[in-house]
Image (cartoon, rainbow, N blue to C red):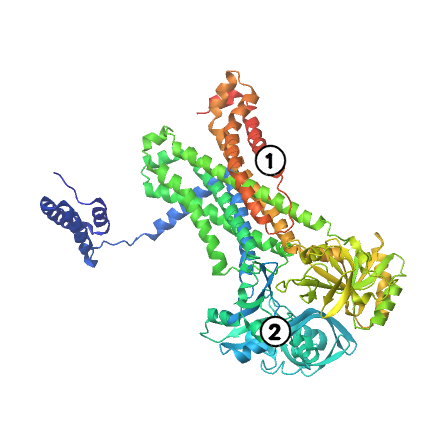
Amino acid sequence: MNLRPPKYPLRFLRWFCREDYLDEIEGDLIELFEKRAERSPVNAKRRFVWDVVKSFRIRNIRSFSISQNSNITAMFQHTLLLAFRSFRRYKSAFAVNLIGLSTGLACAMFIYLWVNDELNVDGFHAKDDRLYQVMQHRVQDGALVTSTWVPGLTASTLEEEFPEVERAIPTFGKGEYTLSVEEKDLQAEGQSVGKDLFNMFSFPLIEGDADQVLADNSSIVISETLARALFKSVDAAIGKTIQLEHDDQFVVSGVFQDIPSNSSLKFDFVVSFNIYLDHAGWAKRWQTSWPETYVLLKPGADFDAFNEKIADLIKRKTNGEITYRTMFAVPYSTSYLYGNYENGEQAGGRIEYVRLFSVIAIFIVAIACVNFMNLSTARASRRLKEVGIKKAIGAGRSVLAFQFLGESLLLTMMAMILAIASVALLLPQFNMVTGKQLSLQLSTSVALPFFVIAFVTGLISGSYPALYLSSFKPATVLKGKLSKSTGEAWARKGLVVLQFTISIIMMVSVVVVYKQIEFVQNKHLGYDKENILLLNRKGWDTGTLETFLSEAGKVPGVLQASSIEHTLIEHVASTNGVSWPGKDPENKTEFEMMAVNYEMLELLGVELEAGRLFSREFGADSAKVIFNEAAIRMMGLNDPVGKQINLWGENRQIIGVLKDFHFESLHKDVEPVVLWLAPQRTSRIAVRVEAGKEKEVIAQLEPLYNTFYSGFPFDYQFLDQQYQQEYLTEQRVSTLSRYFAGLAILISCLGLFGLATFTAERRLKEIGIRRILGSSMAQIVYLLSASFSKMVLVAIFIALPVSYFLTDYWLDNFAYRIDLKWWYFANAGSLALVITWLIVGWQSLKVASVSPSKYLRQE
C-alpha cells in the first residue's frame, strides 16, 4: 500500500518553509509518516498535520518581503493600462456595464438614505430605551379597536401611584395658532404638554431650566427660529409676553433648539397642559379619552410587569363602570413605524414601506450586478488569444488572474464614484418627491456598504475570466477552442430570467399601486368634496359666526356657507354616551361625534336615506340628532325616524338617516356617526364655491374675513386638497415606485442589449453561411430572438403569480380596494416581450443586413 502524506498540509509546508531547510524538514516528516502509516494510516495523517504545525517556527519561515517595490508599481501601472485599453476596445460593453451598475447603485443609495431616515425617526432621544407611549384598546362590535388617546388624568396618576414611573406627560391640542407680539402676528404650530417634556425628550433648551419652564400656566416655551422671528434674538425673548390667538397672555420662560426633522413630535411652541385640566371639568373624567400620554420608566423597571399593572387602571378608577377599555404601553420610538393595529395586535405601519423599498433596492442592485456579471463573463471568451499569448511567453496564472480581477474591480469602483456623484446631484429633487430633508454624508455607515457591494460585485464578475480562462493551456487557447460549458450557458440564461422576473414584478406592482391611489382619490365618498373652501373659525362668539356666514353667502360665486366641527378626513372625537331602546348593556360601541351648523349637510351634498336634515323652518332642532346607516344597522333599529335615543343623559329624537359617507381614511370601514346641531361648537367654516370662480371668491372673502376676525391670518385650504394629503404617503410610494421600476426596466434592457450584441457577434460566421444558403432576414431575426423570447416567457411564468400574491397582500391594507384585473398582469408580460423583441430584433437586423462575405473573411 503506497500512502501519501495529506496534500494540503504538505503544500502549506512548502509555502512557508525556507528553501535551504525545506528538503531536510520535508524528508524527515515524510519518513516519519511512512513509518506510522504501516501501523495506522489514519493516525499517520493526523500526526503529519501536527508535525507540519510544529515546524511553523520563526527560524523556518521564509522571507515574504518583496525587495523590488518598483516591480509591483510597474505591474500595477501595466494592469491599469491594459484595463483602459480593454475598456476602449469594447466600448459598448464598457458603457452598458458602467451605466447599468452606476444606475443600480445610485438607486440603492437613494433608497438607503430614505430607509435609514425612516428607521431613525424618534431614535435620537438619550433616554429612548426607557421612553414609552401609553395607548388603549376598547372593545367594539366584538373586536379590539386601538387608539393613542387615553384619559386626561393618566399621566399624573402614573407618576403618583406607580413607583416604576420616573416621569409622565400628556400632550394635547396640536395645531396652528396665531402668536402676537405688539403689531406682529405669526402662525406657529403648538400644543399643550406636561411640565417634564424637556426632562424626558432630547429637545435641548438654549435658555431656561427644564424643571421650571412649564411650571405654571402662564409660561410658554418657543423654538429658536420662532424666537428670532418674534424678538430678533434668543436672549431678547426670555421674559417677554406673547399673546395667543389674540386672547391669552403668556410669558416666554425658555427657548429650545429647533425640533430635528426625524422627530414625530413637532412643534414651534408649547404651553402647560394644566390649562385644560384647570378650566374643563370633563377633562378630569376617566370616562373620556383625549390626550396622548408618554412615560419614562426608571432604570431597571420591568416593562412587562408595568403593562400588566396599567391594563385595568380605567376599570379601577371608574369603580368597575368601564371594563371594555384597557391600557398598555409601547416603546416610544417604535410607534412611528409600527402604528397599525388589527383587533388589538400590532399589524405593521410605515415599516411596510421600509421593507418594500429595501426589497426594491436589493432587486435593483441584483439586476445591475447580474447585468455586470453576465456581460463580463460573456465578454471574457473574446480574449482567448490574449490569454494564450500571455501564457505562451511566460505569464503565470496569478498574473492573469490579477489582471482580470483588476479590470473588473476598477470598473465597479468607477461605477460607484459615478453613482455617488449622481446621488449628490439629484438629491434635492429626491427630497422634493419624498418630502424629506436628506443629505449625503459619506460616513462609514453610508459609504462602506456600497463600496463592499461594488467590491464583491467586481470580485465575483471577474472571477470567471480570472480563474477559468487563466487555467487553460496555451495551445488550447491559441487555437480558440474551448469546450462549451453547458453549466455556464444555463447560468447565464438563469440570470436573464431572474432580471426579467424582478422587472415584471415591479411593473405589475407599479400599475396596481397607481390604480389603487387613483381609486382612492376618485372614489365617491358619499358627499361632494370638490370646490369646498375651508377656513379656521376664531373665537367662540356664535353671533359673529352667523353674521360672517350670512355676509359670505352674498359674495358672488359663493353657493353656500356653513360650519362644522369635523375635518371629514380623519377621526376627531368619539363617544359611547348613546343609548337606544333595546340596547345591550354590554354594547360599548363608540360613535364618531360631528357637530354641524344649519345648511352644512346640504353644502356637503350628503344623501338622505330617510327623514330630513336640520332646518331653521322646524325650530328646536338642537334637541334632534341624525345618524348614518352604519349607526342604524349597529343599533338594530327599524323605522328609526321619530324614535327617541339618549345622548349624554338627554333624550333626543332621530329626525334623519344619512347614507354612509366616508369621514376617515379608506383604510377603514365607515364607522357609526352621530350628528347634532351645535353651531357654537363648530370650529371650521365651509364655503362651497362655484366652479371656475375660486380666485375671485378668495379675493373677496379675505377682506371680509379680516373684518370679522381681525389680526388672524386668512389661511384657507380646499377640502379635496386636504383629502389628498391624507394619502400623501401612498402617493409618494406610488411616485417612487414608478421611478425605481422604470430604472429597473432600463437596467434590464441595457443588459439585454449587451447580451444580444454579444450573441450576434459570436454567431457572425453562422449568420453569413445561413445568408449564403438562402436564409431570409426574417429567419435570421427569428433565430437570434427565439432563445431570448423563451427566457422572458419563463420569467413571465414565474413573475405573474408572485406579483399577484404581493399586490393582493398590499391591497389588504385598504378597507376599500380595487379588484386585480387580468390585464394588469398581461400588459406587464407583454411589455417585457415587446421590449425583448425590439432590442434583440434591432441587433439582429443590424447583423443580418451586412454582406455575408464580410463575416466569412473574418477568422
Q: Position of residue 832 (x, y in %)?
A: 57, 36
Left or right of 559? Residue 726 is left
Given the current orientation, which residue lies at the most extreme front position?
582
- Residue where numbered disc 1 is placed: 826
Mark 2 sits on what residue? 170
> Gap in Å between the C-alphas at discs 2 and 1?
53 Å
Q: What amino acid is labelled 1 in the image?
A: Ala
Tag 2: residue type? Answer: Pro
Give the mark nearest the N terminus, 2 or 1.
2
- Establish if 247 lies above or below 577: below
Q: Is residue 531 above or below residue 281?
A: above
Dividing the picture into quarters, in which one does residue 515 lie? Answer: top right
- Residue at disc 2, secondary structure: strand
Question: In this orientation, which residue lies closer to the viewer: 497 or 687?
Answer: 687
Report whether residue 207 is seen: yes
Q: Residue at x 73, y 49 (%)?
A: 524
Which residue in the rendered view is the most extreme toward the top? Answer: 773
Residue 422 coordinates in the image, percent (x, y) = 57, 51
Instruction: Point out residue 403 in the picture as x, y percentages from the top left corner.
Output: 39, 43
Nearer-the-camera pick, 847 or 194: 194
Vertical order, 86 against 669 (above or below): above
Q: From the viewer's perspective, is 454 left or right of 692?
A: left
Q: Position of residue 626 (x, y in %)?
A: 76, 60
Kind of element beneath mark 1: helix
